[in-house]
Image (cartoon, grey):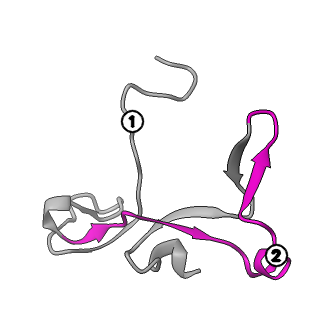
Amino acid sequence: MDKKGFSQYNLDFKPGLFTCTKCDKGCPTCNIVCDLASCIGEFYQTECWCRKDTAVRMKTPLWQLRKYDGQFLANDSVHKLFCNKGCGGGVCDT
């Protein structure tokens, strides 16, 4: 077992919006589980960049230059999220 928290699989969890048409209610004390094959909806695939209003008002730049290697990096005020095609839904609506 790898003690660093990594596994042999590269999992990429993405939010989505689904409606379940057939739920598994076999465990009365568990959350309701829905087989993905019984769902209608989509996983969010579009990467959206969001910032708080204060960062926009203060005109915080989107990018910072890392001087030791000349790479441009997104500022800490930039939050990269996966949302629907219109950059809405899930956490993108907050």
Locate residue 38 relative to residue 66 in the image: left or right: left
Instruction: Please identify the quarter of the rendering in which residue 11 is found.
Output: top left
Kind of residue at disc 2: Lys
SS of the residue under disc 2: loop
Locate residue 28 relative to residue 12 in the image: left or right: left
Quarter of the image where the C terminus is located: bottom right
Of the pair 11 and 59, the residue shown nearer to us: 59
**Residue under the image location 29 percent in, 63 percent down:** 28
**Residue under the image location 63 percent in, 63 percent down:** 79
Q: CA distance from mark 2 to mark 1?
A: 36 Å
Q: What residue sits right under mark 2 in the picture?
A: 59
- Kindly give the residue lying farthest to the top in the view shown: 1
Q: Earlier in the sequence, mark 2 or mark 1?
A: 1
Is residue 52 a member of the stretch shown in magenta? yes
Residue 55 % position (x, y): 79, 74
User: Disc count in the image?
Assistant: 2
Locate residue 43 relative to residue 61 in the image: left or right: left
Of the pair 24 and 20, the residue shown nearer to us: 20
Residue 21 % position (x, y): 15, 75
Q: Which stretch appears magenta?
A: 40-69
